[in-house]
Image: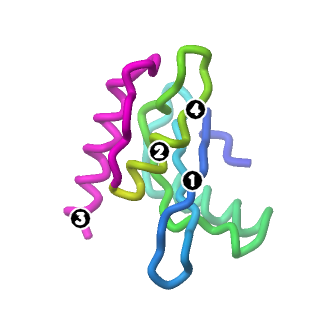
């Protein structure tokens, strides 16, 4: 277990070689700053606890998860962002602003690669 993580969600992302690969979205506990060490820790923990097949293609450290008003994480929205698709209707989310923040992160990641 990675103690710095407050919440996590895994979504499938299309891959030209493997078909689908898991991408993991994590939000950190208050007071924890995101860094590459946390991403490495998440990846190595999944590989050791579940097996190398569970190693995520990418670990996204996000400020918060897109959630319904009842607190359910909207994996549909995360999957759409990771697959560069339209997120659809997000007007009923409790925190729709986080979707734009995560989309911006996606664009920043594309520019880095």
Question: Toward which corner of the image does residue 69 lie, by quadrant?
Answer: top right
Dot 2 falls on a residue whose secondary structure is: helix
> CA gap, disc 1 to disc 3?
22 Å
* Mark 1 neighbour class, 10 Å CA radius: few under 14, some 14 to 19, many 20 or more: some
- Image marks 1 and 3: residues in contact by CB distance under 8 Å: no
Dot 1 falls on a residue whose secondary structure is: strand
The stretch in magenta equals 85-113
- Tell me the quarter of the image containing the C terminus: bottom left
Residue at screen point 56% across, 70% down: 20
Q: Earlier in the sequence, mark 2 or mark 4?
A: 4
From the image, tell me which residue sits under label 2.
78
From the image, tell me which residue sits under label 4.
73
From the image, tell me which residue sits under label 1.
11
Dot 4 falls on a residue whose secondary structure is: loop
State the scheme by which the image is colored.
rainbow
Q: Earlier in the sequence, mark 4 or mark 3?
A: 4
Residue 40 percent location from the top left of the image: 55, 62
Q: Nearer the viewer, residue 47 or 86?
A: 86
In front of the other: label 4 or label 3?
4
Residue 19 is covered by the magenta coloring: no
- Image marks 1 and 2: residues in contact by CB distance under 8 Å: yes
Residue 91 is covered by the magenta coloring: yes
Q: Residue furthest front?
A: 89
Q: Earlier in the sequence, mark 4 or mark 1?
A: 1
Residue 59 percent location from the top left of the image: 50, 56
- Image marks 2 and 4: residues in contact by CB distance under 8 Å: yes
Dot 3 falls on a residue whose secondary structure is: helix
> CA gap, disc 3 to disc 2?
20 Å
- Image marks 4 and 1: residues in contact by CB distance under 8 Å: no
* Mark 2 neighbour class, 10 Å CA radius: few under 14, some 14 to 19, many 20 or more: many
């Amino acid at each position: 277990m990675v103690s710095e993580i407050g919440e996590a969600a895994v979504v499938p992302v299309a891959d030209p070689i493997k078909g689908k690969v898991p991408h993991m979205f994590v939000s950190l506990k208050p007071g924890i700053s995101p860094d590459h060490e946390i991403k490495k820790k998440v990846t190595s923990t999944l590989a050791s606890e579940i097996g190398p097949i569970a190693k995520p293609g990418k670990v996204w450290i996000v400020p918060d998860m897109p959630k319904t008003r009842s607190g359910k994480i909207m994996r549909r929205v995360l999957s759409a962002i990771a697959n560069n698709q339209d997120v659809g209707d997000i007007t009923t989310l409790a925190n729709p602003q986080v979707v734009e923040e995560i989309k911006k992160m996606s664009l920043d990641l594309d520019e880095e690669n």
